[in-house]
Image (tube, coloured by chain):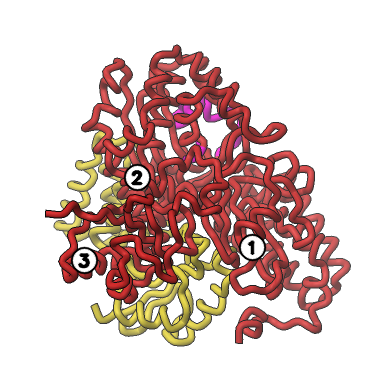
Amino acid sequence: MTTPVTVYVPRDSAALSVGADLVAAEIERAAAEAGRSVRVVRNGSHGMLWLEPLVEVVTERGRIGYGPVEPEAVADLVAAGLLDGADHELCQGVVAELPWLRDQTRLCFARVGVTDPLSPEDYVGHGGLTGLRRALELTPAEVVAQVTESGLRGRGGAGFPAGIKWKTVLETPGELKFVCCNADEGDSGTFADRMLMEGDPFTLIEGMTIAAYAVGATEGYLYIRSEYPDAVRTMRRAIAVAREQGWLGGDVLGSGLRFDLHVRVGAGAYICGEETAMLESLEGKRGMVRAKPPIPAITGLFGKPTVVNNVLTLASVPTILADGAAAYQALGVERSRGTQVFQLAGNVARGGIFETAFGMTLGELIHTYGGGTRTGRPVRAVQVGGPLGAYLPADGLDLPMEYEAFASAGAMLGHGGIVVFDDTVDMAAMARFAMEFCAEESCGKCTPCRVGAVRGVEVIDKITAGQDPDGNLALLGDLCELMTEGSLCAMGGLTPMPVRSALLHFPDDFTARGEKSTGRYEEANS
Amino acid sequence: MASPDPSVTDRVRALVAAHRGDRGALLPILHRIQAEFGYVDSDVVPVLATELNISRADVHGVVTFYTDFRAEPAGRTVVKLCRAEACQSVGAEQLVAYAERTLGIKVGQTTPDGSVTLEQVFCLGNCALGPAGQIDERVHGRLTPARLDALVTKAVDA
């Protein structure tokens, strides 16, 4: 009997969205028909999403990739020698040697796409648990010091130093403390949290466990948005496996550490990505933002000291403990240390995950790696940092990807989500959408956000309709200032950022609309 | 107020009991009710309030805050189209307009025969493969009018 050929077909929901399940089934069927024995492994995605479904075949040369593979093409591919890694027009060569992957520094995403996400053997075999074991040899205060020295900042968008937050929780006395992971990844253009949870869930569990040890927490909650059912399923299964393995529970890795973890599912409210709204939601309430202070590190979930971190912040921690703070701190620039998982999205030829040290320019990411727009038309605008981030014009892409450089350009690096638009975009419509989105998703607690967003839509409509443009532009400016200064949280406080940046860089879209029409995308593509 | 169906009341009580040890259990319970009945009937609000020892206003406030909890059943197939920025950059608005035209309903409505509910969603986390949509529980990427038609027809026929 011959050894079965190992074939990888991703189970990531982006890959599934373009037929990966059908591809996997077709491969089993075609192989059986050809009398070949195969072992199909459902891995995470490598993040080269334009190649999905990306099928990999294990050969002596390494893992040979084929993509994008449509289910209908599988039979021909197998006949053409896919199971032996034969050449083909869809053959990408050895996947690990592709420039897109080779040029990255993958710390968070080291195992994503490589391993079977739910295999504890794969996890440990690829360096998993090294960070947690190392942490357990240190005192909690030493673990916090490692995280502080690494320079790790919150990857959810705000960029607050993780070590300082942890130190506050550690030093706040309390019988009961919590670690909460914010996986309410609602921003358009971001999918790294989802891919990590689906592609390497044990890393997040390990990161949360290290956080629990460092601050003295015994219970953890992972708040995942309901729009991510695959991530919810994967994390729940991974937690069950981790309990069986003794990685969670009453005696973590035989160290005496007690920590358990629960998945909670959101219910379609964008605002629950704001940390205090998320805590309210976890308590079973409406996702209404809390005023700060008190800060969650002192008065958090159910009033107890609570670490609230984003998925990628926590998933960065195992690496920091395993390889030391200095190694992490050596990467990056200025006050942005380590790596960031950038996400190329929207109208981009090669979209996906690109994890690299801070400091690469936005233009290099979009043009060199992203390959420009998917439509082949010129880039006109780029939104970085989600719906609350600024729009940058095509000639403003030489910004280095680091927190302070973006802040000083009136923009926001946020979580590193990058959405590309071609020259058919109507920027007044995008500004209007920012206000519309805020009106739709505002929790309603503070007036600048709840009412301001509705007024924002109205005043932009007046401007684009040509009604007293000067007066209404002045009014919009006032409104933006009020929302920025007067809102309780970033929802109302940052909605003016996309609006003002659109006005600043693309004023003609608002006031010289005569020669333009709506539906430019359709015209350009007809 | 009409008193709720006793079998529904018993079932809701059982769901609450299953989450008795959970902290802040209202959302997990509402998800279970939504999954089992397809919507959260206003009749279950007082039952939940009594079982959880909170006010009816509190329960009502939570049910109505979150988009996921429906006040009435949806169509047999639910089509959600992403209208967030990344999908807009590759023609999501045109796709939504196409769906509204061909289904003969607006976003947020259900076809008169109860077969399809069309909804908008802000981000499915499939931002590099837009326009994205979700048909029942499955996310689809690189949607075109033709692909959407085929997927909706398949779901409706299933």
Amino acid type indicated by mark 3: Ala
Crowding around mark 3 (Cα neighbors within 10 Å: few <14, some 14 to 19, many 20+) is many
The magenta region covers A290-312
The chain to which mark 3 is attached is: A
Question: Which chain has been coloured red in this picture?
Answer: A
Nearer the viewer's eye, disc 1 or disc 3? 3
Name the residue beneath numbered marker 3.
A31
- In percent of width and height, residue B112 lies at 35, 84
Crowding around mark 1 (Cα neighbors within 10 Å: few <14, some 14 to 19, many 20+) is many
Cα separation, mark 3 vs mark 2, equals: 22 Å
Number of on-image labels: 3
- Secondary structure of residue under mark 2: loop
Residue nearer the viewer, A28 or B107? A28
Q: Which quadrant holds the C terminus of chain A? A: bottom right
Name the residue beneath numbered marker 1.
A420
Q: Residue furthest top?
A: A139
Q: Which quadrant holds the N terminus of chain A? A: bottom left
A301 drawn magenta? yes
Name the residue beneath numbered marker 2.
A115
Q: Earlier in the sequence, mark 1 or mark 2?
A: 2
Chain B visual colour? yellow
